[in-house]
Image: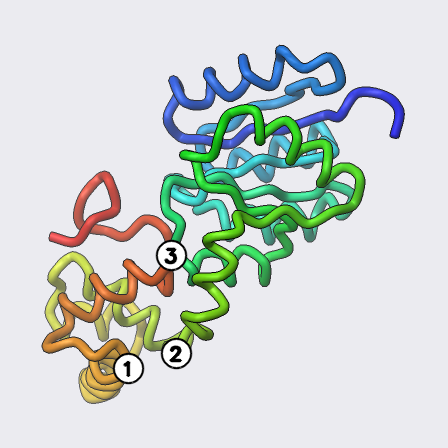
Amino acid sequence: MTGLIRVLLAEDQGMVRGALASLLGLEPDIEVVGEAGDGEEAVAVAVRERPDIALLDIEMPVMDGIAAAAGIRARVPGCQVMILTTFGRPGYLRAAMEAGAVAFLVKDSPARELAAAVRRVRAGERVIDPGLAAAALSAGPNPLSPRERDVLVAAADGASIGDIAGRLHLSEGTVRNYLSSAIQKTHARNRIEAVRRAQAHGWLPGRLPGRPDGGVT
C-alpha cells in the first residue's frame, strides 16, 4: 500500500475530535482530510473529500454514526467505515456491521491501536474489539422489530400513547400492541424500563430524546 491514508473524523465533542486528529496527524502515512461534528455533516464531507477511511462516533446529533455509515457506504463506496465509540454494546456492533462498517473499536482501547487499526482496514482487514465481538455472539440478534424500535424511541421522552400515535401515524391501539410486545421481548416491567434495557443492549439508535446525553428521563 503506497501513499497517504486519507481519513475523515466525525465526533460531536470538539476536544475529542481534536485529540484524535492530533494523534493521527503524528503518523507519517495518515492524513486527516476532513472533520465533522454530526453524522449528516460526515456524509457531506465524505462526498466532498472522498477519504479512504471514515472514522465515526456512534453518539452524534442530527444523524448517528450507524446511519452515517450507511450513507457514506452508499454514496462513497470506496470509503471504508470504522466505528469508534464509548459504548461497547453488542447491538451497536451488529447494527454497525449491517450498515457497512468494517471496524468497531471502543474508545478505551490503547491509543497506539488506533493508527494500527486504520492501516489494517486500509489493507482490507476487518478490525473488531475482541471482547465486544465475543459479547455480540453471546447476546444474539436484536429481538425488536423496526416498528417496536420506533415506538420505544418515541416513548423515551415520556410521551403519551396519543402523542406517540400522532408522531408515527399509527392508531393508539397499534402503539399499545407494539409497546406491549417490546416490553415482553426486553423482559421489562414497563415501557421506560424497556427503553433502558433496549438502549443498554444497543438495540435502539445511539442518541434518544429526553436528555442531551441521550439518556432517558
> For the residue marked with disc 1, what is the amino acid?
Lys
| 55 displayed left or right of 152 | right
In the rendered structure, are the residues bearing label 2 and label 1 in contact, judged by CB atoms less than 8 Å apart?
yes
Q: Secondary structure at mark 3?
A: loop
Residue 64: x %, y % from top left: 44, 46
Which mark sits nearer the N-terminus, 2 or 3? Answer: 2
Q: Residue at x 48, y 45 (%)?
A: 65
Q: Quadrant of residue 140?
A: bottom left
Q: Which mark is on residue 205? A: 3
Which mark sits nearer the N-terminus, 2 or 1? Answer: 2
123 is higher (above) or lower (below) than 71: above
In the rendered structure, are the residues bearing label 3 and label 1 in contact, judged by CB atoms less than 8 Å apart?
no
Q: Which residue is mark 1?
A: 185
Q: Residue at x 17, y 50 (%)?
A: 210
| 71 displayed left or right of 76 | left
> For the residue marked with disc 3, what is the amino acid?
Pro
Residue 83: x %, y % from top left: 53, 43
Nearer-the-camera pick, 138 or 153: 138
Which mark sits nearer the N-terminus, 3 or 1? Answer: 1
Q: Secondary structure at mark 1?
A: helix
Residue 66: x %, y % from top left: 50, 51
